[in-house]
Image (tube, rainbow, N blue to C red):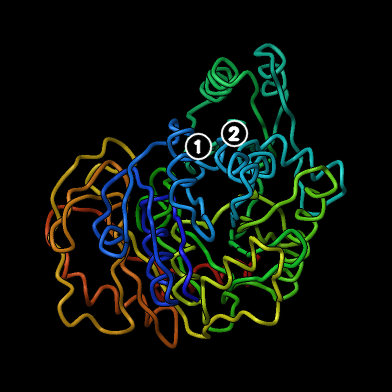
């Protein structure tokens, strides 16, 4: 579809989206924070702005007069950009700030579930008093998670067993959140395997993507701190080897009920709704709900999408989605992120050289938070390059990435076990033995 799309964002998932827009015949005008060389190469025009420059961004979009706008990063969706564009009658395939509260406020998300009886909720308490939070934690005998109310890029959630040496450290972390955010969310810790489910929705119809799993921990074997995501997997059947089909159906039903509940709550949701779920031994629980494409899982599903992405964006914005019209290719896929040394602790900017000569058709390199050229990039303090591969099996795709690592030279870190046979076997074994 030959339309003009304005895309806000400059990371790996936005690179993946830009490539699909070009393949579908669309024209791209991009608004970026870093000078991503891949997105630049596909854009008719490039503008630079941060999330705090709302009026500048809205003026740029009005002047460009696009057919549709897609706002990608969470820090931009939290602002009034989409609200102002909708007021100006500009089509947007992203949620308003009010609908985006399901991600920007974890407390709102939990309370919405409680009010509308959405299944999958977990035990939680909200505190605005250090005294009450401390008393609650002193009396709590089981494991728990402490969460800031707002956006944290996947790095603000801390668990008692993984992140604190004692209860006093946990209390001090909770107090620091109250001092900063005025409220803290304390949730029951649940165990199992996480999975991600994403869907495009126009506020009524949902088009579900294949289930994915994000590897959040920094190091092989799920060691180290949480990150924004070191890589992700999908399987050819739309499920994952350790998941029960009935639990995927439950997750789909939960996302559909979120969309309806948001509408009933006065917030029409249009865009991508993305749920992080936990398959426990007994049921499916909601970890969090987000209002955007996931990263890295969004790279998987965008690349697997089988159709005209411009049509999908327009149908989302125009409330014309037809569930049976859009499909995803049935192959397995893996993404592994290359990150700067020290990522997760104290990242160091560096230079990486990229060789894309004779790149196999089922392997792709996406550019993340970098600047420079397609052959030589300067990293920031965030994820730099995403290597994507497809295969008949997840582990075959994983091995293809490993076989192409020679293409990246320089100092970097990455997880090698993402999608490996050993990693998947461990996940399957957990549900077999318990």
- In the displayed orientation, state which residue is furthest to the top: 131
Q: Residue at x 53, y 81 (%)?
A: 307
Q: Is residue 283 left or right of residue 64?
A: right
Residue 196 appears in the picture as rendered: yes
Given residues 420 and 362, the one toward you in this image is: 362
The image quadrant that residue 181 belongs to is top right
Q: Are marks 1 and 2 in contact (CB under 8 Å)?
A: yes
Query: Mark number for residue 147?
Result: 2
User: Looking at the rendering, in which quadrant would you find the C terminus?
Assistant: bottom right
The image quadrant that residue 198 belongs to is bottom right
Q: Position of residue 133 (x, y in %)?
A: 68, 19
Q: Position of residue 200 (x, y in %)?
A: 63, 64
**Residue 376, relative to residue 130: is it above or below?**
below
**Residue 272, relative to residue 104: is it above or below?**
below
- Secondary element at image label 1: loop
The residue pinned by badge 1 equals: 152
| Distance of label 1 from label 2 (alpha carbons) | 9 Å
The image quadrant that residue 336 belongs to is bottom left
How dense is the environment of label 2, judged by Cα within 10 Å: few (below 14), some, or many (20 and up)? many
């Amino acid at each position: 579809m030959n339309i003009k799309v304005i895309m806000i964002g400059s990371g790996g998932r936005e690179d993946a989206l830009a490539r699909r827009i070009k393949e579908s015949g669309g024209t791209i005008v991009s608004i970026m924070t870093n000078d991503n060389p891949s997105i630049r190469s596909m854009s008719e025009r490039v503008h630079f702005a941060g999330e705090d420059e709302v009026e500048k961004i809205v003026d740029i979009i009005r002047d460009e007069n696009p057919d549709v706008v897609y706002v990608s990063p969470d820090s931009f969706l939290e602002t009034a950009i989409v609200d102002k564009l909708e007021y100006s009658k500009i089509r947007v395939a992203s949620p308003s700030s009010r609908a985006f509260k399901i991600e920007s406020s974890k407390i709102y998300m939990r309370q919405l579930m409680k009010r509308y009886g959405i299944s999958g909720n977990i035990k939680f308490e909200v505190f605005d008093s250090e005294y009450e939070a401390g008393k609650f934690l002193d009396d709590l005998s089981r494991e728990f998670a402490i969460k800031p109310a707002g956006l944290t890029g996947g790095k603000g959630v801390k668990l008692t067993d993984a992140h604190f040496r004692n209860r006093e450290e946990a209390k001090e972390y909770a107090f620091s959140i109250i001092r900063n955010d005025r409220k803290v969310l304390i949730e029951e810790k649940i165990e199992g395997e996480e999975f991600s489910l994403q869907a495009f929705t126009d506020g009524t119809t949902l088009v579900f993507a294949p289930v994915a799993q994000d590897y959040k921990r920094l190091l092989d074997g799920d060691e180290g701190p949480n990150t924004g995501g070191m890589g992700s997997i999908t399987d050819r059947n739309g499920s994952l080897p350790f998941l029960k089909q009935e639990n995927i159906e439950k997750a789909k039903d939960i996302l559909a009920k979120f969309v309806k509940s948001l509408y009933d709550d006065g917030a029409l949701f249009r865009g991508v709704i993305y749920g992080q779920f936990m398959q426990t031994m007994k049921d499916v629980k909601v970890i969090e709900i987000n209002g955007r494409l996931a990263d890295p899982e969004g790279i998987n599903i965008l690349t697997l999408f089988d159709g005209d992405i411009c049509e999908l964006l327009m149908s989302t914005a125009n409330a014309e989605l037809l569930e049976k019209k859009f499909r995803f290719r049935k192959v397995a896929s893996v993404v592994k992120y290359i990150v700067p040394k020290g990522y997760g602790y104290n990242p160091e900017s560096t230079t990486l050289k990229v060789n894309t000569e004779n790149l196999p058709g089922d392997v792709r390199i996406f550019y993340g938070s970098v600047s420079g050229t397609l052959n030589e990039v300067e990293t920031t303090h965030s994820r730099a390059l995403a290597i994507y591969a497809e295969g008949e099996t997840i582990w075959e795709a994983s091995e293809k990435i490993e076989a192409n690592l020679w293409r990246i030279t320089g100092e970097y870190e990455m997880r090698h076990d993402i999608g490996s046979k050993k990693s998947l076997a461990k996940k399957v074994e957990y549900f077999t033995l318990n």
